[in-house]
Image: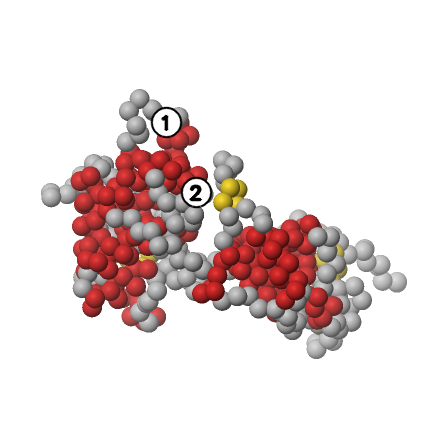
Amino acid sequence: MPATKRKKPLYERGGYKLVRRDGRTSLEIIWYDGERKRERSASAGTEDVEQGREALDRLYLERTKGDAFCPTCGQRRIASGVFVTAAIADHLIMSAEKPSIQAMTARLKHVLEYVVATDQSTILCDAVDETWIAKFRTWFGKRPIVSPGGKERVRSLSTIENSVLQLAAAINQCGGASARFRARQPKEVNRTPQHRSDVAQLADMFRHCLLPAPGKQPPDRARRERAALLGFLRISVTTLARPDAAMEVSTDPERKQWNSKARILNLNPDRRRQTRKYRATVPVGERMAGILDGTTGFVVPVQSVRSAWETMAASIGLPAEGEAGTKLIRRSMADILRRRLPQEAWGEIEIFLGHDRFDDVSGLYAPFRPDYLQRALAVINEVVAEIDALVPGAFPQPRSSTC
């Protein structure tokens, strides 16, 4: 009896085929294993064709490293014949589980926009050299950052270079290809803002959130934005967290961040892998602990506070030109701690900032010692009390407190 002819694959790449089999709920990926001399299969884990394509691409890249076969003829390919768009797509697929995937996607999106804008959809990785990158930098630098409210600001050189760096990573990962350009070093393009806020100016930020001008009751949306900004200010002052980490602080037990009994906050949620920008585990004072105990879920219940921050910055007169972004709290608190702590205690500041850490074993137990970062925490508690004295309600005392 003749064999049943197979239906045309829903998607095919380098000998890997996405098929739908009768009686199966999920799509399947089939391929010929040359070592075992037989056909193999794996579930795509989905009925959706687009998700199945992504599953096939992921399996193909994991098994072949992207360089084993030509996606059209199935023959071993030369890595130099890879489109930039394909290299970017493969890089994002392989990096889907990384904590930094959102940042990576945003950075490479700018490269893809340039490719489209200059009609270079078929440009190969080998053609991207220093001259090409120089043109990209010029094009990207002329595109300002526009806020949701329509305000424009100049794009920083470091933002541009982050896209160049990510493109190099995408090309280098693609089947043994090597980027023919280099991203500039951070010290060449970063201009660290010089402005630092003192306690009085930090208090002004809280006052903006809690005490609107008399006779000018903000609309509901503005009130919600100010409430979210207040949460961001509180967690940033008490933990010195980077803005992205502050936005992700949650009391949800499944995230395993807030240990109420020990008064310890892990800025890195459970199952999120640490990156080069290390997120520390820090002690929390009684006032902020009371706020966390009274919070369900995220301390900052929105995805972005940029608009609220910019409104506040204009209202209290923070400097412009990139001197007073959302990282200002972190930098200002670090500056205040260095001024108030003896130099031998500055190591505690570095641990709060995530610039230094214990080894893996010590790091598991150190946060639960009574003396863990206590000198830095004492100064943070001083600042918290000073801010609340200037703006009552900024950091209310816990109800159970007898102080």
**Viewed as shown, does residue 108 lie left or right of 78?**
left
Q: Can see residue 44?
A: no
Observer able to see residue 3:
yes
Q: x%, y% of residue 387?
A: 22, 43
Q: Position of residue 288 (x, y in %)?
A: 25, 46
| 350, above or below 289, in the image | below
| Residue on which disc 1 sits | 218
Give the amino acid type for the residue marked by disc 2 in the picture: Arg
Q: Residue furthest bottom?
A: 35
Q: Quadrant of the N terminus?
A: bottom right
Q: Quadrant of residue 312?
A: top left
Q: Please rate how many residues cluster around mark 2, counting C-alpha atoms within 10 Å: few if below 14, some from 14 to 19, many from 20.
A: some
* Front in this rendered view, residue 399 or 122: 122
Relative to the observer, which residue lies in front, 398 or 158?
158
In the image shown, does 220 or 51 lie closer to the viewer? 220
Badge 1: few (under 14), some or many (20 or more) residues near its Cα, within 10 Å? few
Residue located at (62% from left, 53% from top): 139
| Image side of residue 110 versus residue 241, left or right | right
Query: Residue 329: x, y in percent?
Result: 32, 50
Q: CA distance from mark 1 to mark 2?
A: 18 Å
Query: Secondary structure beneath disc 2?
Result: helix
Residue 228 higher or lower than 5, as above or below: above
Q: Earlier in the sequence, mark 1 or mark 2?
A: 1
Residue at image location 51% in from the left, 41% down from the top: 152
Q: Which residue is mark 2?
A: 306
